[in-house]
Amino acid sequence: MFTFLLWCILFVICWPLALVALIAYPFIWLLLLPFRIVGVAVHGVLEVIHLGITLPFRLLAAPFRV
């Protein structure tokens, strides 16, 4: 909602720039999509490594939790 309000203000101030931004946004989103996919994959791998490292400690601590 905040982004839309900023775009409306930009449209009032400089409507050609607002229209260019409106047209360019989908192309920029498509350009950045592979980086998002790589980020999700790297996050998943790091999470698996973290869980693999901390699993023995969690298993040892489990019976003593109250």
Image: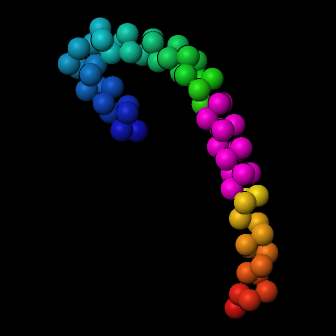
Residue 16 is left or right of residue 62, and the answer is: left
Q: Main secondary structure of the magenta part?
A: helix
Q: State which quadrant residue 19 falls in.
A: top left
Q: Note whether 5 is above or below 66 in the view shown.
A: above
Quadrant (top left, top right, bottom left, bottom right) of the C terminus: bottom right
Q: Position of residue 44 (x, y in %)?
A: 70, 44
Q: Magenta residues, as a range?
A: 37-50
Q: Position of residue 31 (x, y in %)?
A: 55, 16
Q: Note whether 38 is above or below 18 in the view shown.
A: below
Name which residue lies at 26% across and 22% down: 10
Residue placed most toward the observer, 57 or 27? 57
Residue placed most toward the observer, 45 or 22? 45
Residue 36 is left or right of residue 8, and the answer is: right
Q: Note whether 38 is above or below 28 in the view shown.
A: below
Q: State which quadrant residue 30 falls in.
A: top right
Residue 40 highlighted magenta (yes or no):
yes
Quadrant (top left, top right, bottom left, bottom right) of the N terminus: top left
